[in-house]
Amino acid sequence: MARRIQDFRPDMPESYWQVIDAFVRAAVTDAQPATVYSAQDLLSVTARHVLWCWQTAGLALDRKAVFNRLVIEEFIAHGCPTLSPASKGNRRSQLLRMSEALLGQEGCPGRLAPLPPSDPVRPYSSSELVALGSWAAGQSTATARRDAGTLLALGAGAGLAVEDVAGLTAGMVTVDDLGVLLAVPGRRPRLVPVLASWETPIIEATAVIPADRPLFRERRTTPNKKNFASNFVDCSAGVGIKPSVQRLRATWIVGHLTASTPVVALMAAAGVESLEALTRYLRFVPGIDPAEARRALRGQLRDHSG
């Protein structure tokens, strides 16, 4: 760790780094053992934070000032304008763990306000899904066409995220009289029924792939590599629209919300525990006719009192 800290060079003017260099290295050296983060991760975020504190906020290079939780909150709110909410949240967590390690409760004046959730990605339109079907059919080999179709089906037909696709093998697919059911493994294990319109690519893939092999990109040797799906898409044939797994999942979620799928069932299939994870997609759901809404709300509710 000491060598990594010593060799670190941030992406900033050398004249700035000379001023904050020793302060940053010493803070990371003292704090890193008490956190779950690597020295490399902490060095990067700390260098940016300390630079902002010294250059923009005009603070002295003093730990009580720089790692005060309210100062960290100001940096995240005003010093990271190009970061997504998720990246801001990760950066704030790293700096807060630094604060706890270096200052204890002294740097903790109170609970910080939660960061706003990230905006949901836009689902695909019907015409875009047709274009994606053409992309899959236009791949240069039978294996690539099968993988492309499977990726679309797992995303738009079952709402799987990249990490779900990574661990799914052919043996985790059940085909019966009720359709196709995926036993998704990993961090959010669950059973996911596939939309009827997307069942065929999955059925065809399971017919030729051994049960213990990945359903998508059967021959890959690093099934959990983070960018395995995006690498396939980036290297695929075609010059038009290409799929994003996030947008495919969004398409699946919005489709179920539009179809009024029971929300408890949808949360279970999506692998989420918070309604907010679904309600943020409501902006993409078409409005309902007032008369239809009234009839639905007037309908008889089931008695769940037992």
Image: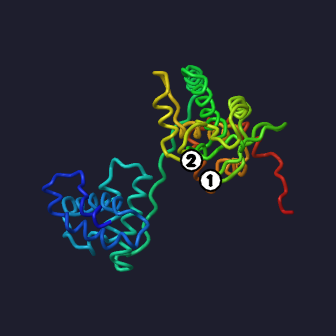
For residue 294, say whether it is visible: no
Query: What's under tag 2, amino acid-wise?
Result: Glu
Q: Position of residue 231 (x, y in %)?
A: 47, 36
Return the residue at label 1: 186
For label 1, count other residues whose C-alpha is less than 10 Å away and answer few (under 14), some (14-19) or many (20+): few
For label 2, count other residues whose C-alpha is less than 10 Å away and answer few (under 14), some (14-19) or many (20+): many
- N-term mark: 1 or 2: 2
Quadrant (top left/top right/bottom left/bottom right) for the C terminus: bottom right
Task: Tell me the SS state at disc 1.
Answer: loop
Q: Position of residue 161 (x, y in %)?
A: 58, 44
Image quadrant assignment for residue 57: bottom left
Q: Nearer the viewer, residue 173 or 301?
A: 173
Q: Please say if 240 is above or below 116.
A: above
Q: Please say if 128 is above or below 278.
A: above
Q: Position of residue 270 (x, y in %)?
A: 65, 48
Q: Residue furthest left?
A: 15
Q: Nearer the viewer, residue 163 or 19?
A: 163
Image quadrant assignment for residue 19: bottom left
Residue 230 left/right relative to 159: left
Q: Residue at x 69, y 40 (%)?
A: 170
Query: What's under tag 1, amino acid-wise?
Result: Gly
Q: CA distance from mark 1 to mark 2?
A: 8 Å
Q: Nearer the viewer, residue 217 or 86?
A: 217
For residue 79, say whether it is visible: yes
Quadrant (top left/top right/bottom left/bottom right) for the N terminus: bottom left
Q: Residue at x 39, y 55 (%)?
A: 88
Q: Nearer the viewer, residue 25 or 156?
A: 25
Cβ atoms at labels 1 and 2 below 8 Å apart: yes
Image quadrant assignment for residue 286: top right
Q: Which of the numbered marks, if any, corresponds to residue 163?
A: 2
